[in-house]
Image (cartoon, helix red, strand yellow):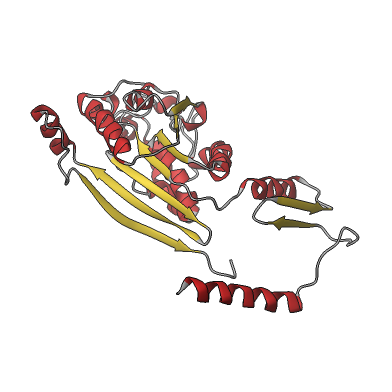
Amino acid sequence: MDKTLAKLDFFERLRNYESVYECLTIEEDLPYIKLINVGQQVITNRINGYLASQIVFCLMNYHIRPRRIWLTRHGESQDNVKELLGGDSHLSPRGEIFARALSDFINMQNLDNLQIYTSTLVRTIETARYIKTRYHTRHVRILNEIYAGRCEGMTYEQIEKEMPKEFKARQKDKLRYRYPFGGESYLDLVERLKPMIIELERTKSDVMLIAHQAVLRTLSAYFEQVEKEKLPFLSIPLNTIICIIPTPFGRSEKRYTLDLDKYLTWKNKQDPNLPVDWVSCKDVLEIQYSSSS
């Protein structure tokens, strides 16, 4: 639609709203929250209780400023190669290649202001270490991988053989299954990550999170509006960068896959120009909020 026509249409809709809209005042004996100019001003009246207070807190942090949220798993770790759960291992040689490729990928985006968050585990910190120092990097425990309790350091084959009841329980309900001896479930992870979601909604600059599969599944499920039962099965592969772009009327998502073999060949040739096909991009999601939602 032409911009001039869109503007005229918008103001015409406002006039229609004004003809039927009744303004709430502080004298009203009703609980309500009034947002003015998308958070420039927040007025609350008779707000009581935990849930209502949390809604106010969330609304105070929302905005429509353009920015991008980048999500990526750490590079392949030594424990990934051995198919071990959890742990705090270093990157594998291929993981090191991804860390360098990630740095070059970020440089290609020409980001003026980027905040980077990693977990406190070695493999995410090592993945971020080649990124330009002018970007501020924080290491936060809230982004650590789901804790597997007694199953830390085991393979799924070992769990199936040595702890068959636990293995079957996880297969039956992956969302609610909690690993034994102090482990976590996906629902525990949802609760743990709520402050990070608020931080992502609040931040007005580009943000990159370098984290782990279960953590990124949980965050992606929030942004993609995925049903919680499907959360544990979202695809978050290695060597892939997810770019989420929030908009006033929804959000879109792109996925960039880095071809590490082509990247390594380029590095070995010491060619100053990166091959154009070392990154593939796919538009995978576009959500438009309806007027009734």
In the picture, measured across the screen, residue 186 lies left or right of residue 90, that is: right
- Is residue 165 something one can see in this rendering? no
Residue 112 higher or lower than 60, as above or below: above
Question: Which quadrant is home to the N terminus?
Answer: bottom left
In the picture, measured across the screen, residue 145 lies left or right of residue 100, that is: right
In the picture, measured across the screen, residue 104 lies left or right of residue 9, that is: left
Q: Compare residues 124 and 17 and report the one nearer the observer.
A: 17
- Is residue 242 something one can see in this rendering? yes
Q: Position of residue 43 (x, y in %)?
A: 77, 52
Residue 266 higher or lower than 230, as above or below: above
Question: Which quadrant is home to the C terminus?
Answer: bottom right
Residue at horizontal 28%, vertical 54%?
Answer: 282
Q: Compare residues 131 and 150 and report the one nearer the observer.
A: 131
Q: Position of residue 7 (x, y in %)?
A: 56, 72
Residue 105 higher or lower than 251, as above or below: above
Q: Position of residue 157 (x, y in %)?
A: 28, 33
Residue at horizontal 57%, vertical 40%?
Answer: 194
